[in-house]
Image: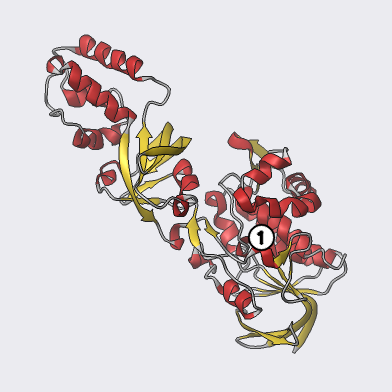
Amino acid sequence: MERFDTLIIGGGPAGLIAAIRAASLGQNVAILEKNSSVGEKLLISGRGRCNFTNAEEDINVFVSKYGENGKFLYSAFNKFGPIATRNFFWKIGVRYKIERGKRIFPEEGGSKRVLDALIMQCKKYNVKILRSCPVKALKLKNGLIDYVITENNEYSADKFIIATGGKSYPRTGSTGDGYNFAQQAGHTITKLYPALVPIRTKETWPKLASGCDLRNVKLTVILDGKEIDERFGQMEFTNFGISGPIVMELSSHVPDWPGDLQFSLDLKPNLEYGILINRVKREIKKFSGHKRFSGLVRSLVPAKMLKLILELSDIPHDKPIEYISDEEIFDFVKLLKDIRMGINGLWSFNNAVVTRGGVNLKEIEPSTMKSKLCENLYFAGEILDLNGPSGGFNLQICWSTGYVAGSVNE
C-alpha cells in the first residue's frame, strides 16, 4: 500500500489546483484520476476557449451570482478569490484578456494553455499523477478514511480531497462517483439536476428554425400566467427546443418553477408595439404591389426564422402585402414580440455544463472545505452543492475551493 500526505480523487481543475497548493506547502501529494489524462472536462470548457474566471471585482456581486448558497464561498474567496486567481494564472504564464460580460479568457491557446500550465506546476512540485486509476471505494476506520481502493492498488493518506466533479458531461469522466464516496463517509447529497443546459419545449416547431442564432432578444419566464424572470441576449433554436446563453442560464432555475411554465420570446425587445407596427406599415407602403407576406417576413427576421414565423402566423404566406389588414398587422407584430413556448423539461446531464446540487454545504466547513462528519476528508469543485451562471463563475468555484482544500495544513 502506497502512502501520501494528501491524496486527491479527481484530476480536474479543482483537483489540480488543490494538488499544487498542497504540494507547494511541502506535502507529498498524489492525484488519482480515472481517465487516461487529467483535465478532460477543462479542455472543452468555453468550447475550448476556457472562460476561467470573471473580472467582476465587487465580491458581493460575484457571490450573488451563486444564489442562496453563494454566501458559503465568502471565506474561500477571501483566501483565493477572482483577483487572486487571475494573478495566479498570470504568474504561471497564462496571459489573459477580458471580453464581453467581464469574461476572462487566455490570450492564446485556450483551455489547453490553462491545463498545460497547471500540469507544469504539478511537475514543479512533484505531484504524482496516477492516470487510469479509478477509485472503487473508501475504506473507513474509527470515523476516518483509512485508505482508498482502486482497481489495481490501495492508497492511504493523512487527508483525502474528493474533487471528482458532478454528473455533467459524463463522457469526460464526470459520472457522479464522488457522490457515492461522500455518502460512504456519511454525507447527504441534495437533489441533482443538470444546469446550464438546453431546454426542451412542448412544441415541435422550434426545429423549423434549428440552428438559428438570435442576438439581442428577450426571453421572459411566465409561471401560472405571471412574469417572474427575464433575460436579454443570445439564444438559438434546436431540433428539440431552445439553447444559447440566456436559455442555459434560465435552465438552472427551471426546477424551482413548478406549475404551468412558459417562455415568451421577444424578437424586437428594443421596439415598442406602436413603433414596430409603424415600421411594418412603412414596409407595406414601400413595397406594395411587389411583395407577398413571406417577403415582408423575410425583411424583418433572420432567414432561418422564416419558416417558423410563417408556420406560426395565420396570414397566408403568398398573400399580397397591400391586402394585409390592420388587425393582421397587429397580430403579426404581437407574434414577433411574444412567441410562446411551453417548457417540457431539461436536456440530460450529457448536455449540461454543470451540475446543480451536490454534497450538502451544511456538512462542510467553509473556511477549510473539511467534512464535519469525517475528520480527514475534504471536498472541492463541482461535487459541492454550488453552481453559478456562465461567465467564468463555475470554474471560479473550482479554483477557490480547491485552493482552500489544499491549504488545510498551512
> Exactly how many numbered labels are in the figure?
1
In the picture, residue 166 is in which quadrant? bottom right
In the picture, residue 274 is in which quadrant? top left
- Up/down of 396 relative to 151, above or below: above
Q: Position of residue 396 (x, y in %)?
A: 67, 51
Residue at (38%, 19%) from the top-left corner? 272
Residue at (76%, 44%) from the top-left corner? 83
The answer to whether one can see residue 132 in this image is no
Q: Residues within 10 Å of mark 1 (few under 14, many from 20)?
A: many
Q: What residue type is labelled 1?
A: Pro
- Up/down of 50 relative to 334, above or below: below
Left or right, residue 71 beside residue 269:
right
Residue at (30%, 50%) from the top-left corner? 239
Q: Where is residue 37 in the image (x, y as percent from the top left)?
A: 61, 69
Left or right, residue 228 beside residue 105:
left
Local secondary structure at mark 1: helix
Q: Mark 1 points at which residue?
A: 13
In the picture, residue 152 is in which quadrant? bottom right
The answer to whether one can see residue 384 in this image is yes
Q: Position of residue 329 (x, y in %)?
A: 22, 20
